Amino acid sequence: MDTLERIKQTVTSHPIVLFMKGTPQFPMCGFSSRTVQALKSTGADFASVNVLEDPEVRANLPRYSNWPTFPQLFINGELIGGCDIALELYESGELERMVKETHKA
C-alpha cells in the first residue's frame, strides 16, 4: 500500500486523528502538546500518528492534506487544521461540539 493510501485509510478509519510530533503521552513539540491538551480537555477519544517515527507519512501528509505543518487534526475524515486553528476552535467551544458530534455518529 502506498503512503498516501495508508494516510487516507488512517484518516477514514478513525473519527478523530492527530498527526503529530511525538505521542499524546510524550509530545515532541509545543504545538503538538497544545493540540493534545485541547483535545483531551474536550474529552476526545482520538487516534494519533507520530510523524517522527514514519518519515514517509511525514513527507507525504502535506501533499495529502495540502497543509504544510504539523500537527494536523482530522475529524470525520476532514482536515480541521493545525495547532492555531485547533486552539481557536477549543476556545470558542466549537472543538468540543465537533468532538461530541463524532460520538453521536
Image: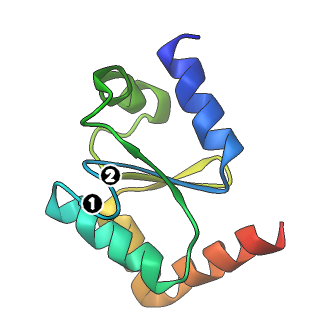
From this viewpoint, which residue is outermost toward the front? 25
Quarter of the rendering occupied by the C terminus: bottom right
- What residue would you read off at disc 2? 71
Q: Crowding at label 1, few (<14), some or many (≥20) Cα neighbours within 10 Å?
A: many
Are the residues at dot 2 and dot 1 in contact (C-beta closer than 8 Å)? yes
Q: Nearer the viewer, residue 85 or 102?
A: 102
| Rendered image: mark on residue 47 | none
Label 2 vs label 1: CA separation?
Answer: 5 Å
- Find residue 85 and report its horizontal and vertical position in percent: 38, 66
- Find residue 48 and report its horizontal and vertical position in percent: 45, 51
- Residue kind at label 2, given as amino acid type: Pro
Residue 96 vs 17, above or below: the answer is: below
Q: Residue at x 33, y 28 (%)?
A: 54
Q: Nearer the viewer, residue 24 or 83?
A: 24
From this viewpoint, which residue is outermost toward the top? 1
- What residue would you read off at disc 1? 32
Q: Residue at x 39, y 78 (%)?
A: 38
In the structure shown, which secondary structural element does the residue marked by tag 2 occupy?
loop
Question: In the picture provided, is 8 more to the left or to the right than 83?
Answer: right
Quarter of the rendering occupied by the N terminus: top right
Q: Crowding at label 2, few (<14), some or many (≥20) Cα neighbours within 10 Å?
A: many
In the structure shown, which secondary structural element does the residue marked by tag 1 occupy?
helix
